[in-house]
Image: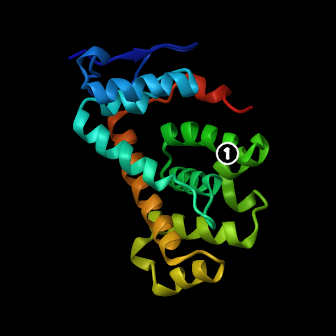
Amino acid sequence: MADVEHISGKGSAVPVSWFPVPEEEELPEGLRGLFAKAREAVGFVPNVFRAYSYRPERLSAWFNHYKQLHEPTENLDAAEREMIAVAVSMANGCLYCLVAHGAALREALGDPILADRITLDYRRAGLDERRTAILDYATKVTENPLDCVPEDLTRLREHGLTEQEVWDVVEIAAMYNFTNRMSLACGMIPNEEYHALAR
């Protein structure tokens, strides 16, 4: 097991995580394959993979869940799923997920200015009523879950989401609340490469 691993940039070196980060060759074959696919797709291994590999079996479970939740559907596309990720992450102040999913949103939208505005303040980004309703509910799940009522779900159905897509909004918001808290509590720092993606 490696010691706490650091990344360096223009400032001082900062750890990828406050927990030890295993050497890649120590990981199970499936995770080494995941790391290789990430390098092929984006040119680097996301630090969240490296940090979560401290518990390899849980990284596999988390990643499979993540993939399922980001599978687009007819009324909840890939960009809207990333919008939920950044809206929840902004509500939680999660540096890692804001940087990483801000980049993913820029790519999914093909509009870096709109994506950055949504990431920083979706309420002032000029979104339509439907997308605003989706993100309002995702942030309500995050900030005031005890205030959630059946009418919140009805509102999303009235905007054209199916019952399963409404469930997806809830589950994506809940998953990012988990991921944000893991990132914040473990001191995860995003890869510098994210900042330049899809600009």
Which x, y percent locates residue 145? 41, 71
Closer-to-camera residue (172/95): 172
Location of residue 100 by image quarter: top right
Q: Is residue 40 above or below residue 141?
A: above
Q: Quadrant of the N terminus?
A: top left
Q: Determine whether, in the image, residue 148 is placed left or right of residue 43.
A: left
| Residue positioned 44% across, 53% down in the render | 68
Closer-to-camera residue (104/113): 104
Disc 1 on helix, strand or loop?
A: helix
| Residue positioned 68% across, 40% down in the render | 107
Which residue type carries mark 1?
Answer: Ala
Looking at the picture, the colour scheme in use is: rainbow
Which x, y percent locates residue 2? 25, 15
Q: Which residue is mark 1?
A: 108
The residue positioned farthest toward the left in the image shown? 1
> In this rendering, does residue 17 appear at all?
no
Q: Quadrant of the C terminus?
A: top right
Which x, y percent locates residue 123? 70, 62
